[in-house]
Image (cartoon, rainbow, N blue to C red):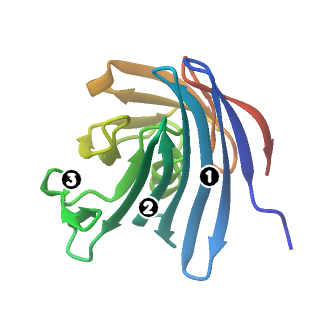
Amino acid sequence: MRPHPSILWRRLDLEGHDACLLCEADDGWKLRGHALFVHDGKPCSLAYEADCDSGWRTRSARVDGFLGAETLHFEIERLADGGWTLNGAGQAEVAGLIDVDLGFTPATNLLAIRRFDLGVGMSTPAPAAYLGFPELRLMRLEQSYRRLDDTRYGYDAPMFGYNAILEVSPAGFVLDYPGLWRSAARLE
């Protein structure tokens, strides 16, 4: 059996790390990870999982952990009709979207990168159901990807004024997320 791809990132804008494992499931894919970082001087620990079908369409995501003394638990589900729920409550702002983007980790960029499977020179809008941090609510994130070559993508997220070139591994993990994250170790 071949090993599952995994990665460890070092956070660049704050003290912290994130480790993630990509697993093939019977009927799709799972990302499992754990982000540890400092936020507003408080320790933060967020274990996460994103579950996708075989076409890389998000089915659900879960986040468990703490920020300072506050316990956090979030269940995200994409429904068959295209709706989304967060801890069971409907999320109209993100209805019809396909990808989840967990705002505290670079792991979920892999989902759109794998799902779109862009050829060199191709680009696409890739709006996502974005779990913001630290507010931890779902909102629509307009973003786009443009494949520059075998390992680099132009990425744009206007809501944050962020536009950069992302270096990406063969498995789809972002290796260099300028100003935010950089790979410290990986297995593919």
Q: Could you tell me the amino acid type at mark 1?
A: Gly
Q: Distance of mark 2 from mark 1, alpha carbons?
A: 11 Å
User: Mark 2 or 1 closer to N-term?
Assistant: 1
Question: Tag 2's secondary structure?
Answer: strand
First in residue order: circle 3 vs circle 2: 2
Look at the picture and state if 158 lies above or below 78: above
Q: Is residue 98 above or below residue 27?
A: above
Mark seen at residue 94? 3
At mark 1, the secondary structure is: strand
- Residue found at x 51% / y 73%: 54
Q: In the orientation shown, which residue stands out farthest toward the front?
A: 69
Residue 163 place in picture, x, y as percent: 41, 20
Disc number for residue 64: none
Residue displayed at 44% across by 30% down:
155
Q: CA distance from mark 3 to mark 2?
A: 14 Å
Nearer the viewer's eye, disc 3 or disc 2?
A: 2
In front here: 14 or 158? Answer: 14
Regarding residue 108, the answer to whether it shows in the image is yes
Q: Which residue is mark 1?
A: 33
- The numbered dot on residue 61 is 2
Label 1 CA crowd tier, 10 Å (few <14, some 14–19, many 20+): many
